[in-house]
Amino acid sequence: MRKAIVKRKTKETDISVKLNIDGSGKAKINTGIGILDHMLELFAFHGLFDLEIQAKGDLKVDIHHTNEDIGIVLGEAFKKALGDKKGIKRVGSATWPMEDVIASVTVDICGRSFFRGIITPAQPKAEKGYYLSHANHFFEALANRIGMNLCIDLKSSNIDLHTNLEPVFKALGKALDQATQIDPRRKGIPSTKGVID
């Protein structure tokens, strides 16, 4: 079973993540950041990951530390649950529409982190103190900890942050589900190097 429990406690945050990659999309998430809770529930549902996240952070200071650390711990959970990555498909991509927004997400679990973030001329407005820059920081922390190439393309003229982020998180769930699935034809590590760090 590809499962992991990861806990991380610092002077700024206390976070625990429980992940089952081969789940059914059940989520129980409480980060203290409402919009992030909702987006992670969508991510888990459409990725068919069972995901529990409990987070306490210094939200009285700002969102930054909690938001970033959740990305770090979730990434660590995926990395731990995937183990040596033997047999995984490694690459996944998905495109998701919502109203006038189209999000395309491509991932490669290759051991080398790279993140190309969300850029949109629409300049979405913050939602309860959560900005597009916070989402980008979360995705960067996630990609860095997994060791994943993560590219997000967003076509949007919509200024509503929720409408922009929802298809991104759904597409990320779908793309990561594809990448983490076992290919029955693959007998070893999906790299000509023979290893994915």
Image: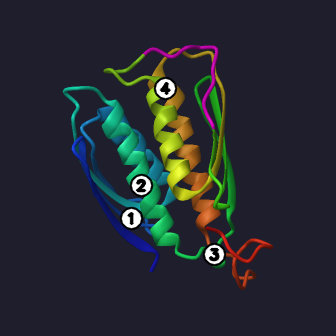
Residue at label 4? 133
Q: Earlier in the sequence, mark 4 or mark 3?
A: 4
State whether residue 106 is above or below residue 192: above
Precedes in sequence: disc 1 or disc 2: 1
Residue that appears at 44% across and 29% down: 134
Asked which secondary structure carries label 3, the reply is loop
Image quadrant where residue 95 sits: top right
- Callouts 1 and 2 close, C-beta under 8 Å: yes
Mark 2 residue element: helix
Q: Which residue is mark 3?
A: 182
Q: Nearer the viewer, residue 47 or 6?
A: 6
- Which mark, by number, is residue 19? 1
- In the rendered image, residue 148, in percent from the top left (x then y), is placed at 61, 54
Q: Residues within 10 Å of mark 2 (few under 14, many from 20)?
A: many
Mark 1 and mark 4 in contact? Answer it, CB < 8 Å. no
User: Is residue 166 found left or right of 180 in the rendered image?
Assistant: left
